[in-house]
């Protein structure tokens, strides 16, 4: 299902690359001006206490569209940490679980931040550039991660950490039709990126400022994450909404997250779990050499030490986080 927002004809935003101008693509822009929250309010958003859109009242359609259409969700409240300097890639390589030595500028990956005993802190998306790495981290972890990085940074590392979250907006297109929507607004400027592997990213120009387009929706479903200057967030959201995306709020995101099996800090990712127990094998390298938590993870893998595993279950009744889940005739099977 796709919820179409009809609009009067307006001058399209500038989204250009290699001399291509969206004025030539005859786009329809919604008749909405203003900042991101203003645009979302006009589109029917209800906000939670943190000022994040909780829902646009398309709950059923949004969850369905993740599998069969395309949704648009604002993720500006997530953290964006920029590690800049010649040593940025090496620092991330040593501080997290994935192998950054295999990545070139324009590529990216999921990686896990862990303690020295391999307990999970967060699952991050890393976008690698020539002399910087942007880490997209969960909403409530950025300050703790900044403090951790600053603790481990030495002058010889040639890297500095910056919190750029407030300076940019971030939205995701999620679902099998995400590439169609992206092509509708950007034309053949995105032909390469829509066919690129997960974590790949490129930079377009939107309203005379950089727009990062990265492969990956934040969930298991196909999609793209777009990061632009904070001042352009409202116009970008309105432009994408005008292309028939179902609008998703934080409440629907949480449903889709659990259904997709993406673990989150404070829920499935805690001081009681490690990345292997959380099923994050794709984000863990066991042979890249020494890094924080590596010794523990190697022992767990080599000695078959993973004793619990994150699973998705379809239940017949409602449960709350922390409830014990049992199977018939068996002792406790786990927790919700």
Image (tube, rainbow, N blue to C red):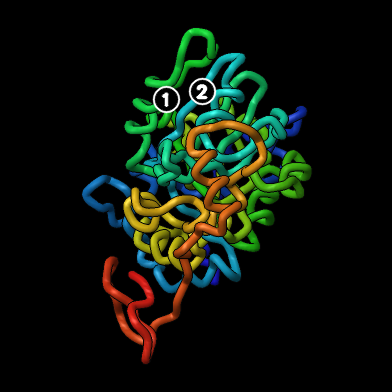
Identify the mark at residue 83; answer none if there is no mark: 2
At a point 35% along the width and 61% down the height, the residue shown is 251
Residue 105's place in the image compared with 188, above or below, is above
At a point 29% along the width and 57% down the height, the residue shown is 46
Identify the mark at residue 26; answer none if there is no mark: none
At a point 57% along the width and 44% down the height, the residue shown is 110
- The quadrant of the image that shows the C terminus is bottom left
Q: x%, y% of residue 326?
A: 34, 81
Q: x%, y% of residue 68?
A: 60, 70
Label 2 – label 1 distance at C-alpha: 9 Å
Q: Check if mark 2's residue and mark 1's residue have beta carbons within 8 Å.
A: yes
- Viewer-side residue, 136 vs 15: 136
Q: Can residue 122 be seen by looking at this rendering?
A: yes
At a point 48% along the width and 47% down the height, the residue shown is 238
- Viewer-side residue, 41 vs 156: 156
- Viewer-side residue, 318 vs 224: 318
The mark closer to the camera, 2 or 1, is: 1
CA neighbours of label 1 inside 10 A, class few (<14), some (14 to 19), many (20+): some
The residue where tag 1 is placed is: 149
């Amino acid at each position: 299902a796709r919820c179409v927002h009809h609009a009067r004809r307006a001058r399209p935003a500038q989204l250009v690359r290699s001399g291509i101008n969206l004025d030539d693509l005859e786009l329809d822009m919604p008749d909405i001006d203003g900042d991101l929250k203003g645009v979302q309010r006009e589109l029917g958003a209800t906000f939670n206490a943190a000022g994040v859109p909780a829902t646009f009242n398309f709950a059923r359609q949004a969850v369905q569209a993740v599998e069969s259409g395309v949704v648009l969700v604002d993720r500006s409240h997530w953290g964006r940490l920029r590690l800049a300097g010649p040593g940025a890639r090496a620092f991330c390589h040593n501080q997290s679980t994935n192998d950054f030595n295999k990545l070139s500028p324009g590529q990216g990956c999921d990686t896990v931040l862990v303690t020295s005993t391999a307990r999970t802190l967060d699952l991050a998306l890393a976008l690698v550039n020539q002399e910087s790495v942007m880490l997209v981290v969960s909403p409530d972890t950025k300050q703790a991660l900044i403090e951790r990085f600053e603790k481990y940074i030495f002058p010889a590392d040639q890297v500095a950490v910056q919190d750029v979250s407030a300076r940019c907006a971030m939205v995701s297109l999620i679902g099998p039709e995400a590439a169609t929507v992206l092509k509708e607004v950007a034309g053949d400027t995105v032909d390469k990126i829509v066919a690129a592997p997960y974590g790949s990213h490129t930079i377009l120009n939107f309203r005379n400022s950089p727009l990062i387009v990265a492969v990956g929706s934040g969930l298991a479903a196909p999609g793209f994450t777009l990061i632009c200057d904070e001042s352009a967030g409202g116009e970008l959201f309105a432009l994408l909404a005008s292309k028939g995306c179902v609008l998703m709020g934080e409440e629907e995101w949480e449903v889709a997250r659990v259904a997709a099996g993406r673990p989150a800090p404070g829920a499935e990712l805690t001081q009681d779990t490690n990345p292997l127990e959380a099923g994050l094998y794709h984000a863990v390298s066991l042979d890249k050499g020494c890094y924080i938590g590596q010794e523990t993870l190697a022992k767990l893998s080599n000695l078959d030490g993973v004793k619990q595993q994150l699973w998705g279950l379809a239940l017949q009744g409602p449960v709350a986080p922390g409830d014990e889940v049992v199977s018939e005739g068996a002792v406790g099977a786990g927790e919700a």
